[in-house]
Image (cartoon, grey):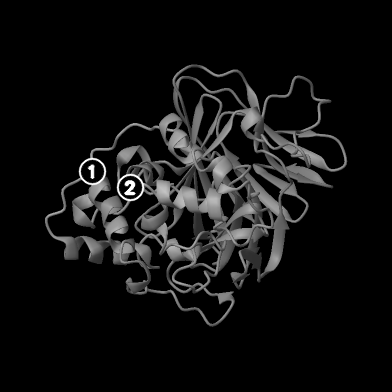
Amino acid sequence: LTKDWLSEVMVHGVRQRLYLNTRMPQFGGENVAHLVERFGKVDALEEVSLPAVSNIRESKDAGYEMMGTQGLSCIACHDFNGQKSGGAGALELIHVTKRLQKNWFHLYMRQPSRFHPTVIMPSYWPGGVSVRKEVLDGSANLQIESLWNYLADGARAKNPKGLSRQSPELRVADETVMCRGRGTAGYRGIGVGYPERISLAFDSEEMALRMVWKGEFANIGHGRFHARGSDRISFPAGIPFHRLESMDDEWPYKGKTDYLFPQDHGYEYRGYVLNQDKRPRFRYRYGEVAVEDFFEDLLDEQGKAFFRRSMTFTTKVDQKMFFFRVGSGMNITKTGKEWKVDGLSLRLSGEGKALVREGEPQELLLPLTLSAGKTDLKVEYRW
């Protein structure tokens, strides 16, 4: 925060996150005002080399384009100039340049998970590389600076494209649609609706697939989204990968006071990038393993839609075997190359052979032993 804004918070009780019930206690200016300067000294970060902007109008126009639904879709989650978002109800954006230091803004935008491991905010410049090559020659520095320059107009900033939404229903046409918020996929869920009229909900807090369904996409509102369609298939709560010491061990779940879960199991969410068709590729880590997770909507020979999931594991050293929990259900069987988990059919490609762990419910576990380098795994979901 800037010194002025931090002073407003500590001395005058200014609030930005109105959706939180917890409030900062007021201790009186004579007791805390001196801390503003001291906090700034102990919370120093590396300095970013800020770009020189030769055309401020071009920069603001680029920021305007990226803010809207045809750009980075910032307003899918964030409120803007008093208008509520249809998604997570995240922080109001027009106060950004008043509240935040520009150096911190640049660092945060490049890697949000650095400052909060479970943040929903995706990374649009992973490794300093922009996912929007056509804007400002693909320069990450100039693009982030353009967002800052656009937001610097505050309440006078032009409303970004797609801001106004009258209906809570999100519909999918010929382009992938996304939403974020609590609900179908937990507290930090991401919903993705695909043109072939199948959808999924991904839990970015635990980095796991939570639901797939057919038909209509989702209803949104007040920081939540819920599946609208039919033929819903739910997946078990908990993390996707784990090293079991014994086949009798319980699969890890988040308890009410497990505030470090799943980071205490080696997980780190790294956001997602969009391909040219706006389909997301989720990125996260499991210990020393970097994972890229991509879902594609396809049609089979009968014209029925299904998901093909492509997972790429990258590691610098050989990994001790761990399990991928592919699914869970009351009845798991195998016919030929196809697994049946209740009403879901699964086809796995890879070197490992899946096994069924008995229990109520049963679990379909795929052992993975990764060698240094890249390993690819494909899973098809049909229902």
Residue at coordinates 28% horizontally, 37% vertically from top-left? Answer: 48
Q: Residue at x 59, y 43 (%)?
A: 207
**Apparent side of residue 198 relative to residue 76 in the rendered image (left or right):** right
Label 2 crowd (10 A; few <14 / some 14-19 / many >=20): some
Q: Nearer the viewer, residue 182 or 370?
A: 182
Residue 2 visible: no
Q: Is residue 320 above or below residue 144?
A: above
The residue singled out by tag 1 in the image is 50
Tag 1: residue type? Answer: Leu
In this rendering, position of residue 145 left or right of residue 271:
left
Amino acid, disc 2? Lys
Task: Please say if the residues under marks 2 and 1 sit with CB atoms less than 8 Å apart.
Answer: yes
Q: Earlier in the sequence, mark 2 or mark 1?
A: 1
x then y, percent, for residue 206: 63, 42
Q: Position of residue 218 (x, y in %)?
A: 61, 69
Mark 2 lies on a secondary structure that is helix
Residue sitting at 63 percent across and 64 percent down?
Answer: 224
Q: Residue 22, relative to residue 129: is it above or below? A: below
The residue to which callout 2 is attached is: 102
